[in-house]
Image (tube, rainbow, N blue to C red):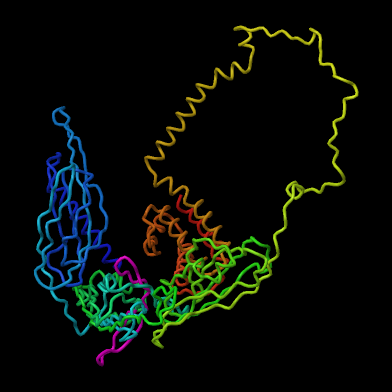
């Protein structure tokens, strides 16, 4: 969901919650439940806010929304909706309390017509309660000459488990503010989905933006295109679909909702959209005099024929991978003793989509498990330079091992229509026998000559151990001795000192707990410095920039007391200026954000020296610390 759409949804929830407070008596009453909706007339594919409002109890059970069939349901969590107040009239004090709780959801209609959100049951305080049904009218979205939405598949025919690229293109003919995509196929049980790696051109970095879709996002690219003889500006992104069911499948219709400029008040009606599409204000325009209208644009419904995988010729260890894959492996060290750890690195490549690729357990490969000890658990793989990399520690069982055998990965080759096995090359090893460890090895010293164990007599016999009474000192005991004893005074002073220390600690802890956000703000710079130090040990430029970006977001969120989430520069610019930050420091922050975001979403080096990024970020944070005090 776009920023404007997200803001609209949060505002809708707040207004609905305020309406619930205003409509209820101040004092606590019986437990009840009520449904509230943001609007009752929507388009298919247009999301709206829905709340289950509980009155009379602040810890109800989670409602059962399984009865909602005509809407896609997204759970957005809940919060308490309680309040208390004190009124004094003629010296008589009255305390007013009300308890409540609100569950928030986002509903999206699946079909046209008069749809009913059924009664939603729940329990509060041991009592069963339910909301009233709500009628919502869903209209069919209509395509216009100014807006069109198209979905295209990279394949018309595929096999179960074979990734297929879904390309979504939005053709835009008017200036817009805010947008919201809804792609039901991404939650369709007949498909799995995965992100598509986008290689960002550093020279066109400003043409990319994040496109939120449901609980995830995609990297969209702005451009230009023609459709049906008309020129448009475009926003295009991709997702990978992985079919789970066979048959002729029609991809469910998607939609994009937006507010478009249809006129202006007190100014020329010239449409500036094509002039500033590539400016930063695209999709988030600030033209206060513009007149907007809501549009919901439907997509086409492409078809995909999904074939079942053949059962004949299926190799052992086949785990459902479809496509074409390559395998390579390396090991270090290659000269070891029996039982020494060997780090085995396996790379799987060759396919466009590798996120869902998992390496079969190495302990199930007979040639490898015969000569090596292999842990049953393996670290998850990570994608690097177009391959998914897995690492595992193995140990040779005996000195006769000459090589690490090929690692095998069974898959179905969709192009050839047959099964195949990708194999790595064997890795030569030199395995020496383990040396027996002696007591001398354990002590770290050699034993020279013969050790004598004979007992020798003490030549002087039994040594005397006697002293006279002159060594005895006066050990008087009593109050007078106590007063003269430093230990007595120390013991006497410990209880009040301990009490004072505990009182100070309690007071400090109480002040800090009263404002935890202030404590987080004070510690934000130290946490940032710690996180940035860790990034210096990472060699991958993309990983370094991604870690710096997340550390900066967390720092700014804590320092400015706003949720870090997917925080962007536009979210914090005004607060930084109000806090006294210099304009050139904000520009440096923008440069760091742009470079890190481009590298994160591109999957490749976005330019510049990644080793300098942590130092630049830390130097900038020091300046902001001085400005924001």
| Count of labels in the image | 0
Residue 507 is situated, as x and y percent measured from the top left of the image, at 42, 33
Foreground of the two, 369 or 506: 369
Residue 435 is situated, as x and y percent measured from the top left of the image, at 72, 58
Snapshot quadrant of residue 118: bottom left
In the picture as drawn, the residue positioned furthest to the right comes out as 459
Which quarter shows the N terminus? bottom left
Q: Is residue 435 left or right of residue 536?
A: right
Foreground of the two, 308 or 52: 308
The answer to whether residue 144 is above or below residue 129 is below
The answer to whether residue 534 is above or below residue 276 is above
Q: Determine the residue positioned at 38% across, 62% down.
A: 566
Q: Which residues are magenta?
A: 210-236
Snapshot quadrant of residue 170: bottom left
* Residue 570 in sight: yes
Q: Is residue 503 left or right of residue 478?
A: left
Q: Is residue 490 magenta?
A: no
Magenta: main secondary structure equals strand
Q: Determine the residue positioned at 68% across, 63% down.
A: 337
In the picture as drawn, the residue positioned furthest to the bottom comes out as 229
The answer to whether residue 235 is above or below residue 8 is below
Snapshot quadrant of residue 266: bottom left
* Residue 276 in sight: no
Foreground of the two, 575 or 501: 501
Q: Is residue 192 left or right of residue 46?
A: right
The answer to whether residue 340 is above or below residue 465 is below
Q: Is residue 211 magenta?
A: yes
Foreground of the two, 498 or 553: 498
Residue 242 is situated, as x and y percent measured from the top left of the image, at 34, 76
Residue 51 is situated, as x and y percent measured from the top left of the image, at 18, 56
């Amino acid at each position: 969901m776009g920023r404007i759409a997200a803001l609209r949804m949060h505002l809708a929830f707040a207004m609905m919650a305020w309406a619930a407070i205003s409509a209820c008596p101040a004092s606590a009453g019986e437990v009840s439940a009520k449904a509230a909706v943001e609007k009752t007339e929507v388009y298919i594919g247009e999301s709206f806010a829905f709340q289950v409002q509980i009155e009379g109890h602040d810890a109800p059970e989670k409602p059962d929304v399984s009865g909602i069939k005509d809407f896609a349901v997204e759970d957005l969590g809940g919060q308490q909706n309680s309040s208390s107040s004190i009124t004094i009239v003629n010296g008589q004090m009255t305390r007013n309390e009300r308890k409540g709780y609100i569950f928030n959801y986002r509903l999206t209609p699946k079909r046209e017509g008069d749809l009913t959100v059924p009664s939603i049951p729940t329990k509060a305080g041991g009592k069963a309660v339910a909301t009233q049904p709500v009628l919502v009218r869903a209209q069919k979205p209509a395509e216009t000459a100014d807006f069109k939405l198209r979905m295209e598949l990279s394949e018309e025919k595929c096999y179960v488990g074979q990734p297929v690229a879904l390309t979504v293109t939005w053709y835009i003919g008017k200036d817009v503010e805010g947008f919201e995509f809804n792609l039901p196929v991404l939650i369709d049980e007949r498909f799995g989905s995965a992100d598509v790696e986008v290689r960002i051109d550093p020279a066109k970095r400003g043409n990319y933006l994040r496109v939120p879709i449901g609980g995830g996002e995609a990297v969209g690219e702005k451009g230009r295109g023609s459709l049906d003889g008309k020129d448009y500006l475009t926003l295009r992104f991709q997702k990978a679909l992985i079919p789970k069911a066979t048959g002729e499948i029609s991809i469910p219709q998607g939609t994009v909702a937006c507010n478009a400029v249809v006129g202006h008040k007190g100014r020329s009606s010239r449409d500036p959209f094509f002039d500033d599409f590539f400016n930063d204000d695209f999709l988030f325009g600030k033209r206060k005099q513009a007149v907007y209208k809501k549009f919901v644009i439907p997509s086409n419904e492409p078809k995909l024929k999904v074939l079942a995988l053949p059962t004949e010729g299926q190799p052992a260890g086949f785990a459902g991978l479809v496509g074409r894959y390559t395998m390579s492996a390396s090991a270090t060290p290659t000269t070891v003793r029996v039982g020494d750890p060997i780090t085995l690195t396996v790379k799987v490549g060759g396919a466009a989509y590798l996120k869902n690729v998992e390496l079969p357990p190495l302990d199930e490969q007979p040639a490898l498990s015969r000569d090596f000890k292999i842990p049953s658990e393996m670290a998850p793989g990570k994608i690097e330079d177009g391959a998914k990399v897995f690492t595992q520690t193995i140990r040779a069982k005996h000195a006769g091992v000459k090589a690490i055998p090929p690692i095998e990965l069974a898959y179905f080759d969709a192009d050839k229509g047959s099964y195949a096995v990708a194999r790595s090359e064997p890795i030569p090893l030199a395995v020496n026998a383990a040396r027996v460890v002696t007591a001398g090895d354990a002590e770290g010293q050699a034993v020279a000559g013969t050790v004598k164990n004979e007992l020798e007599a003490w030549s002087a016999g039994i040594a005397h151990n006697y002293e006279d009474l002159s060594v005895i000192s006066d050990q008087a005991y009593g109050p007078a001795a106590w007063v003269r004893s430093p230990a007595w005074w120390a013991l006497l002073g410990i209880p009040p000192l301990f009490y004072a220390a505990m009182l100070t600690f309690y007071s400090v802890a109480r002040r800090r707990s009263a404002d935890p956000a202030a404590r987080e703000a004070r510690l934000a710079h130290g946490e940032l410095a710690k996180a940035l130090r860790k990034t210096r040990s990472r060699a991958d430029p993309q990983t370094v920039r991604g870690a710096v970006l997340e550390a900066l977001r967390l720092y700014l969120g804590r320092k400015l007391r706003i949720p870090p989430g997917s925080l962007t520069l536009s979210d914090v610019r005004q607060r930084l200026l109000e806090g006294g930050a210099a304009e050139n420091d904000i520009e440096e922050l923008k440069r760091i954000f742009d470079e890190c975001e481009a590298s994160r979403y591109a999957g490749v080096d976005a330019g510049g020296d990644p080793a300098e990024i942590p130092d630049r970020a830390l130097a900038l944070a020091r300046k902001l610390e001085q400005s924001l005090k």
